[in-house]
Image (cartoon, helix red, strand yellow):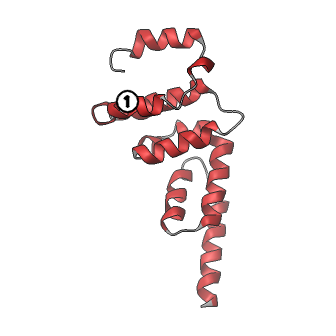
Amino acid sequence: MLQIKYVKDYCVGFLKDTLEVGNCLIVRAFAQMYNISELVTHCDNFFLDNFELVLNGPDFKELNPDETEALIRMAKTSDSSSEEMIFRSIMNWVKHDLENRQQFFKRFFQLIDIKKLPTSFLKVIKKTEWTWM
């Protein structure tokens, strides 16, 4: 039994050492699937340090609505997150599969503090994206 723990610990260490923007969400899902809380926490901390890159990466666009909402909520806890960046991430996620995801826009939009969005940004969004919102 001790050998299995050793192998598990070695694998967890390897995944921590090789964690990067391109695999963060996959490793996090793996850690959640196998209930490896230490690795989930490590992935969450990595995400918070690199959330803008992760939210704009291809894996983010493949998440289901609940996973997407959880990461957006997590990103909002970071002092360095901006409402504009989070709004753009939501837009990118929805537009990735507009036909099936448009229904989730309102749910995610409620996570945005619209008062923190610059007026100039809102004007651009109104001109370019308003037709499907």
> Which quarter of the picture shows residue 49?
top right
Q: Tell me the quarter of the image containing the C terminus.
A: top left
Query: Crowding near pointer 1: few (<14 within 10 Å), some, many (20+)?
Result: some
Q: Which residue is mark 1?
A: 95
Q: Residue at x 51, y 26 (%)?
A: 88
> Which quarter of the picture shows residue 55?
top right
Residue 54 visible in the displayed image? no
Q: Position of residue 10 (x, y in %)?
A: 65, 75
Q: Is residue 14 above or below residue 66?
A: below
Which amino acid type is marked by label 1? Answer: Lys
Q: Position of residue 22 (x, y in %)?
A: 54, 48
Q: Position of residue 37 (x, y in %)?
A: 61, 65
Q: Position of residue 90 (x, y in %)?
A: 47, 32
Residue 123 visible in the displayed image? yes
> Of all residues shown, which one is farthest toward the right?
79
Q: Residue at x 57, y 9 (%)?
A: 120
Q: Residue at x 40, y 16 (%)?
A: 129
Q: Secondary structure at mark 1?
A: helix
